[in-house]
Amino acid sequence: MELDDVDRRILRELNVDGRLSMRVLADRVHISRAHAYNRVDRLKESGIIERFTVQIDHAAAGLGTSAFIALSIRQDSWRTVSDGLRAMEFVDHFSLLGGDFDVLVLIRTPDNESLRRVVLEGLQSLDGVRATRTWLIFDEDRGGLDGTPTVA
């Protein structure tokens, strides 16, 4: 499905606030309410909108220590490693990469001790993981030119 400007504006608005009423969404993107319903339904049916979710203040939720951990893995171990990451506590997100490292993992823990355990006892013990490199996150922002996430 090819996105037009109206679709992109809808996605941008819903990305900022997924709880918008159809009336408010329609007003913000300058279309009728019926058109907004149809567009959102089409975006959901096509799989572009997968689900509606919330954005969490991780520090306020008790997960104030965050880090990116890059993994080097054996060439044949992506499925095993990804299964292990899905089951691991404190894993927020992970991606398969091309480049110097194979996997990038975002970890959010209550404190440094928990982060240490996740890295040393969790990630480094996964079958297929050859090496790790950790970067602590000091501050975060959602990005986008106007403070909202970028939508293609």
Image (cartoon, grey):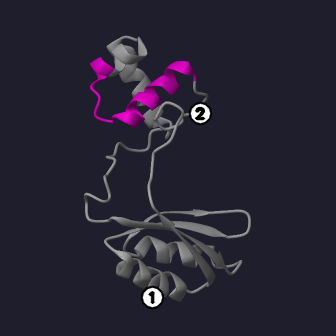
Q: Tell me the number on the disc at residue 152.
A: 2
Give the prevailing secondary structure in the magenta stretch.
Answer: helix
Q: Is residue 27 above or below residue 49?
A: above
Compared with 15, 35 (above or below) is above
Q: Which residue is at 68% across, 81% downward?
A: 74
Whether 21 is among the magenta residues is yes
Q: As rendered, which of 103 and 114 lies closer to the eye?
A: 114
User: Which of the two residues, 17 or 40, is positioned nearer the viewer here?
Assistant: 17
Q: Quadrant of residue 30?
A: top left
Residue at the (31%, 71%) spot, across then down: 110
| Label 2 CA crowd tier, 10 Å (few <14, some 14–19, many 20+) | few
Look at 31% across and 46% down and name the residue there.
54
Q: Position of residue 93 (x, y in %)?
A: 47, 62
Cβ–Cβ under 8 Å for marks 1 and 2:
no
Residue extent of the magenta highlight? 4-24
Amino acid identity at mark 2 = Ala
Residues at marks 1 and 2, CA–CA distance in whole angstroms: 39 Å
Q: Position of residue 63 (x, y in %)?
A: 32, 65
In this orientation, which residue lies closer to the viewer: 139 or 121?
139
For the N terminus, the quadrant is top right
Specify whether residue 119 is in view: yes
Q: Which mark is residue 121?
A: 1
- Per the image, label 1 sits on a secondary structure element best described as helix
- Relative to 11, does residue 90 appear above or below in the rendering? below
Residue closer to the observer: 41 or 102: 102
> For the residue marked with disc 1, what is the amino acid?
Glu
